[in-house]
Image: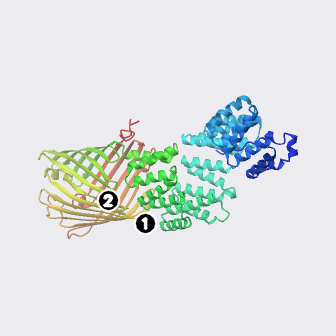
Amino acid sequence: MKTQPINLLFFLFVFNFLYAQNMKPGFSYLEKGNYEQAEQFFENVLKTHPTNKTARLCYGRAVGLNGNSEKAITLFKSLLNDYPTDYEVKINYAESLLWNRNFNSAEDYYIKLVKENSKSFPALLGYANTLSNLKNYDKAMTYVDKALTVSPGNPNALLSKKYIRLGLANKKIQTQEYEESESILKENLIDFKNDSETLQNLANLYLISEQNDKAEKAFEQIGENPNNQLISLNGISLTNHLNEKDKEALVISEKAFGLINDKTVTSIKERTIERYIQALIWNKKFSKAQEEIDNLITRNKTPENWILALRATLNIYKNDFKKSVNDYDLILKKDSASFDGNLGKANALKAIGDAKQAYTYADNTLMFYENQKDAINFIKTLDRTFTPFVSSKASYSFDNGNNEAYSLLVRSEFPLSTKFKLFGSYNYRTNSNSVSNINANSNNLAFGFSYQLLNNLTFTGDAGIFVSESNVNDYSQLLTNLSFNFRPFKLQTLDFGYKREMQNFNTELQDREIVMDNFFVNYSLNTNFNLGLYSQYFYTTQNDGNSRNLFFASLYYSLLEKPSLKAGINYQNISFKNQVPTIYFSPESFNAVEAFVNIIKPDLTVKGKGWFYELTAATGFQYIENDDKQNTYRFQGKLGYKISERSLLNLFGTHSNIASTIATGFTFTEIGIHFKYYFLKKPVFETSKLF
């Protein structure tokens, strides 16, 4: 809060001998805020009149207001020794404590002064300012109003009330009392029409409470003052970004950037450059953003933190998270309380897989910025990753081969730390065929664990038993799944491992007790220019003596980010060593090519309650050995609702005629429902408020 020096008129022009000593120039220096000149003037006066009380008071004020508050306190203490009952001296001493930010001592002293004279304007206003600095805004408001009762319309008191309101409004924001904060800020605008600081605080309130349209209007109102045009444009650019209008955000930032000139205030110039580069990054114009950042670094041999934060942000968007961490370390070395440094590093550490340290730096952010919303939301998101949950999925499927199946899958994960988690699953399935009148059911129970060996390497393994029962054959088999998830380089993921599973798509296959031993490799490559590649290879051996090679590749392009919209081409090749078409689909060669489009709004992007969805549509051709090509189609969809932060429900469905799904000429349909519930509120390694 900004504390205005109290205009103590009682020590100006009081005694006639002051005029004789011609101290009017010194009074004028104090009144106009020329404190250095005032200090020199009264220092000279005291050389010839060292005991003059008024000159000593004026000198003490000039020294304190010129920045040397410690010396001012000493000077006023000396005056108190000489004039222990003088209220005027006491008032100046109290204000010197305020200048020196000794707020607790100032509070105690002002209490005594107000008791001594409850109608003293400087005592009431000084006490209000002290309470404001101690963030006791409600009580500060009471005493500034008392000061205004003594001196109605006093500009210093009104200015103090303005900053008390700003402090109180900010406090309400921290406790998410947004309507109360808005009301307080609007009161300020009554006393200070179109006040830039109040409007900026109001705009900030709207941004934090996600009222982006109101924020934009507030920034537009700020821009009605030509002197605040850059502040206005920078804010409007940000609101456009938050409204997912990044192209418009860049256009506005380019306009603001072009208005910078030699007369632009340095701080506003820096914020404008910063917003312009941010807008370039939002629009993935990474080369231009890098060029601008390099220019800043060239002009600044020791880059300021805001420049380092820009470079770190650019590298996060480019997935160079390690480089981002290095820049955030440089920021924190200069300023351990930096918001960008602490929360930025938390985000980068999370991205590279170091969740434990991510928690540490998010907590650091809250230590310096109490109840900061972005940090709280970051921790909530991170908590959700490690919170135990249970999910259940029930489905019904059928095909044109008269096969029907009902399935129930229950799965649970129980993370014990940021690196280690347990999980288990149970799957019950019934298969039937209306032509053969064969029915079969299976029970599959499995338990496993996952452990993060390195930040970029995780092992997952499970083992279980598969029990099959039918009117033809009963048996049980041990199943397992062992895999490694590896991120060797930025934007790349490699999964590889071994999976033992049963062929149980329909009753006939289930009764044949076909065990499949799969050795697999999945590789994913993303780029910073929206192109992506996913590929998969399976080599499978079966206990019936057959073996299979399966290769799948998907090349896609991201058209939109929110919601995610992708389009691309899929290719699939399958070949079996032995052809046993009367038992299962096992061609010597099978090729399929399809074009697809996928749109998705994940549940993780839903804040609070809300809908999420996914839809994939694909069409193409398949080639089975030497047969003529056949048209293919595939539709997959999901529609869900996030009931709360801890639960969600969705319906899903698939319809396809691709041969590799079952066999040539078949069509397949599946519909189902999925429910997920986080049965604890927080991860188990957070010992409080689990339920």
Q: Splitting the image into 4 quarters, where does residue 76 fall? A: top right
Q: Splitting the image into 4 quarters, where does residue 301 fall? A: bottom right
> Which residue is rendered at x = 42% and y = 47% of the image?
359
Mark drawn on residue 634? 2
In the rendered structure, the answer to whether residue 565 lies left or right of residue 421 reads right
Tell me residue 304's x, y (percent). Answer: 55, 59
Tell me residue 541's x, y (percent). Answer: 16, 59
Q: Quick check: 223 above or below 684? A: below
> Circle 2 — which element?
strand
Residue where numbered disc 1 is placed = 529
Mark drawn on residue 521? none
Q: Amino acid at mark 2?
A: Arg
In the rendered structure, the answer to whether residue 40 lies left or right of residue 244 reads right
> Circle 1 — which element?
loop
Q: Quick check: 393 above or below 536? A: above
User: How many other residues sit within 10 Å of disc 1, few (<14), some (14-19) or many (≥20)?
Assistant: few
Location of the N terminus (image quadrant): top right
> Which residue is rendered at x = 19% and y = 59% of the image?
540
In the rendered structure, the answer to whether residue 501 lies left or right of residue 105 reads left
CA separation, marks 1 and 2? 28 Å
Q: Earlier in the sequence, mark 1 or mark 2?
A: 1
Residue placed most toward the observer, 638 or 456: 456
- Mark 1 or 2: the one toward you: 1
User: How many other residues sit within 10 Å of disc 2, few (<14), some (14-19) or many (≥20)?
Assistant: some
Residue placed most toward the observer, 334 or 72: 72
